Amino acid sequence: LTKYLYWDSHFMFSIDGGVTWSKGNGTPLPLPVVADETGAADSVVLNDEYGYHNWLSSMAAKGGFLHFMYESQLPKVREHYVRFDLRSHSVDSNIYPVWQGQNLSIRSLDGFFATDSSDASALLYAISTNQSKVGDNRIMVLASADSGRTWFDYAVSQSFSHSYAIGGARLARQGGSILGTFTNLIHPDSGATANVNEVWFFRVGAR
């Protein structure tokens, strides 16, 4: 390759603490496993996205599904929510190029899922931002009550210059909080005298 690429994303799982590994359908995977599309692990990205940056932000397991959040930087950027059904051993939902609730939409390289995987009634939260709106980046929280089949607006923050490196705790219990951090990048062309990187903490009530 003549340039760097976040090429793709694959997954495998282990039920014995990493001693052995398998595909999503339980087929054993002998180690080492080739990490690109020539290997045997299950792929998350679409075939026409190879050759472009594919940034996997987060993965979560809940309710018999694996949930994936990633952005593919084709000329027309796609933001993906992908759901893999562990019972049918297949992807049964892939929301793209826009992933949104009623009004809020996610578009970012980073973000995370939060939920209580031990509670079947707990919401699944997707926390990220919409970086397509230059100079008006807001932390956005989408939520799902049906294991990712549909999503609704849950919370939105004040406006930031450029919210980046969004991360947080993956556990969010009912009655507790979604906890996260991010960096607000303030560039000289926004009126600042020099690059300023502000580190922020945020908290959102979970229900």
Image (tube, grey):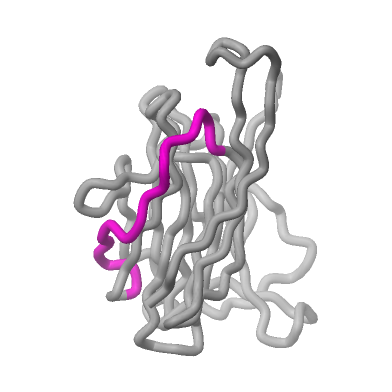
- Between residue 75 and residue 185, name the one nearer to us: 185
177 with respect to 164 (left or right) = left
Report the number of discs: 0
The image quadrant where one finds the N terminus is top right
Q: Measuring 33% from the left and 55% from the top, which residue is drawn there?
A: 94
Question: What is the x, y in percent for residue 48?
Answer: 42, 36
Residue 48 seen anywhere in this rendered image of the structure = no
Question: What is the x, y in percent for residue 203?
Answer: 52, 62
Question: What is the x, y in percent for residue 102?
Answer: 20, 52
In the image, residue 188 sits, relative to residue 197, either above or below, namely above
- Between residue 105 and residue 30, name the one nearer to us: 105
Q: Quadrant of residue 5?
A: top right
Magenta stretch, main secondary structure class: loop
Q: Measuring 69% from the left and 75% from the top, which residue is drawn there?
A: 21
Q: Quadrant of residue 30?
A: bottom right
Q: Measuring 32% from the left and 60% from the top, which residue is drawn there?
A: 154
100 with respect to 191 (left or right) = left
Q: Measuring 64% from the left and 47% from the top, which residue is drawn there?
A: 36
Inspect the magenta stretch and tell me whether residue 5 lies in it: no
Q: Magenta segment range?
A: 147-163
Question: What is the x, y in percent for residue 67?
Answer: 45, 65
